[in-house]
Amino acid sequence: MENDEILDFIDRRFKIDCNWLTGNCYYFACILKLRFNYVTIYYDCIAGHFVVYNPYNDSYYDWTGIVEVDRDKCVYLNELKDQDESWYLRIVRDTIV
């Protein structure tokens, strides 16, 4: 695989796991979104986990790097509230707040 700036960024800055997979995945996705404005934040409904999507290489990322997800079970975060507001509010309560 050619040089991947997102993987390089993760490797350089996030050597220590600060619960990026177990409680802070939303915040890690936000960090990636702030650094790489072209990614979008998705919620993996099966895993209950936030990831970001890179349209340039059609890949999803979390703290571990590129991850495999069931694309049919991932919801674009900005659309989640419109699709099911009560579900969205539960996710916010349980994972973001």
Image (spheres, helix red, strand yellow):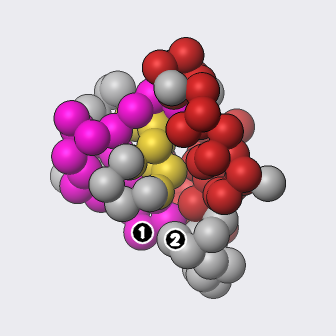
Residue 28 in sight here = no
Which residue, given by chain and number where applicable, does mark 2 sit on? Answer: 21
Q: Nearer the viewer, residue 31 or 77?
A: 77
Q: Which residues are magenta?
A: 59-77
Toward the right, the furthest residue is 97
Q: Amino acid at mark 2?
A: Leu
Quadrant for the C terminus in the image = bottom right
Q: Quadrant of residue 67?
A: bottom left
- Image vertical order of residue 42 relative to residue 51, above or below: above
Q: In terms of secondary structure, where does tag 2 sit?
A: loop
Q: Amino acid at mark 1?
A: Thr
Q: Are marks 1 and 2 in contact (CB under 8 Å)?
A: yes
Q: Of label 1 and label 2, which has the lower sequence position?
A: 2
Q: In terms of secondary structure, where does tag 1 sit?
A: loop
Left or right, 29 with respect to 54, comes to: right
Circle 2: is it few (<14), some (14-19), or many (20+) Cα within 10 Å? Answer: some
Left or right, 59 with respect to 48, comes to: left
Instruction: Kindly report the distance in space between the C-alpha atoms of the residues bearing marks 1 and 2.
Output: 8 Å
Toward the top, the furthest residue is 82
Was residue 61 drawn as part of the magenta stretch in this picture?
yes
Residue at image x 45%, y 28%?
76
Q: Nearer the viewer, residue 7 or 73?
A: 73
Residue 77 at what x, y percent from top left? 53, 31
Residue at image x 23%, y 55%?
68
Circle 1: is it few (<14), some (14-19), or many (20+) Cα within 10 Å? Answer: few
In the rendering, which numbered label is found on residue 64? 1
Residue 94 at what x, y percent from top left? 66, 58
